[in-house]
Image: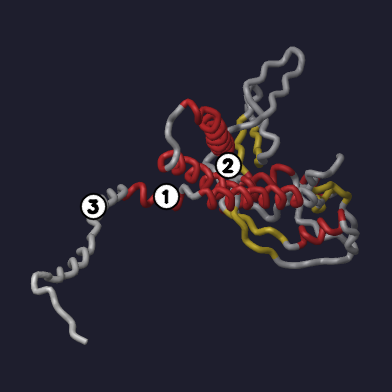
């Protein structure tokens, strides 16, 4: 068997494989670095920080409300809400349980723990809110409700700061036919010494109790003696001096009457 070949036939070479296509990705624009003040305020403006501060404020109100079981309203205001820190007694939780969960009345829990006061939490909330407006919020009509709400909160915080540091509350008692040019502060006390040598006018020297509490002694060029604080009682009652009672008074009504310490009128008292 013989085979013949066609000398005029030439077999074509296979086509070359296609070249791989390379996708050209344009370079991404480099982010513009934020200003330094924005990077500093961003963590301060955190919404998580806002929530934490609100929770701490709620706890402070809770502690301050419980503290009125033993203390007056103004004492609680000064210790808890108009201070930078406060020591919260652990006994408050026992008293809460005695009121609502029938804990035994004999239970006592000594000790206390530090907590943020009203000045600290209020200042932190104010800074957090202002930082949030500088970093995140923008002025627009759509955000009018949020802006008004936040402005109200800022107004409350600043108003309490001004009230707590600069306000004065007093009473003016005017009897019929009388002229009065002074106010009486019912929460601040002083030791007043009156000189009635001149029948026309009285010379009065007043020594604030706060001054005596801080220094122990106080004097004046108008006084021939110094005033010394021996013991201070937020509340007291007068009782007759017994034969066996120790008495510090050497003259005046103090020889027959003595001051006995009494518990402070609490914020929950009905009297």
- Pinpoint residue 259: horizontal percent, then vertical percent: 80, 50
Secondary structure, mark 1, is helix
Secondary structure, mark 3, is loop
Asked if one can make out residue 217 in the rendered structure from this viewpoint, the answer is no
Secondary structure, mark 2, is loop
Residue pushed farthest front?
Answer: 1
Residue 223, labelled with which disc? 2
- Going from the N terminus, do you reach mark 3 or mark 1 first? 3
- Going from the N terminus, do you reach mark 3 or mark 2 first? 3
- Residue 183, above or below 192: above
- Pinpoint residue 51: horizontal percent, then vertical percent: 58, 49
Disc 3: CA contacts within 10 A as few (<14), some (14-19) or many (>=20): few
- Check whether the beta carbons of the residues at disc 3 and disc 2 lie within 8 A of each other: no
Disc 1 marks which residue?
42
- Structural distance between the alpha carbons of marks 3 and 1: 31 Å
- Residue 13, above or below 57: below
- Check whether the beta carbons of the residues at disc 2 and disc 1 lie within 8 A of each other: no
Disc 3 marks which residue?
26
Residue 271, labelled with which disc? none
């Amino acid at each position: 068997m013989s085979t013949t070949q066609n000398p005029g036939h030439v077999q074509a070479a296979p086509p070359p494989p296609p070249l791989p296509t390379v996708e050209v990705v344009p370079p991404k624009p480099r982010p513009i670095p934020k200003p330094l003040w924005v990077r500093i305020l961003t963590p301060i403006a955190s919404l998580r920080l806002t929530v934490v501060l609100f929770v701490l404020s709620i706890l402070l109100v809770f502690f301050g409300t419980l503290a009125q079981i033993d203390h007056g309203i103004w004492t609680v205001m000064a210790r808890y809400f108009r201070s930078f820190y406060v020591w919260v007694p652990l006994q408050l939780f026992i008293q809460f349980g005695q009121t609502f969960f029938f804990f035994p009345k004999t239970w006592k829990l000594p000790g206390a723990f530090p907590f943020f006061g009203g000045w600290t939490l209020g200042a932190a909330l104010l800074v957090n809110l202002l930082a949030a407006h500088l970093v995140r919020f923008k002025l627009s009509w759509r955000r009018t409700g949020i802006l008004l709400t936040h402005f109200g909160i800022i107004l409350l915080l600043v108003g309490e700061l001004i009230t707590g540091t600069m306000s004065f509350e007093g009473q003016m008692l005017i009897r019929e036919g009388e002229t009065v040019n002074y106010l009486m502060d019912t929460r601040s006390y002083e030791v007043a010494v009156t000189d009635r040598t001149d029948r026309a006018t009285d010379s009065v020297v007043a020594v604030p109790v706060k001054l005596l509490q801080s220094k122990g002694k106080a004097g004046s060029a108008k006084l021939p003696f110094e005033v010394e604080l021996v013991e201070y009682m937020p509340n007291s009652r007068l009782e007759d001096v017994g034969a066996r009672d120790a008495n510090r008074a050497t003259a005046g009504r103090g020889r027959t009457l003595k001051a006995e310490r009494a518990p402070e009128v609490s914020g929950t008292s009905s009297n």
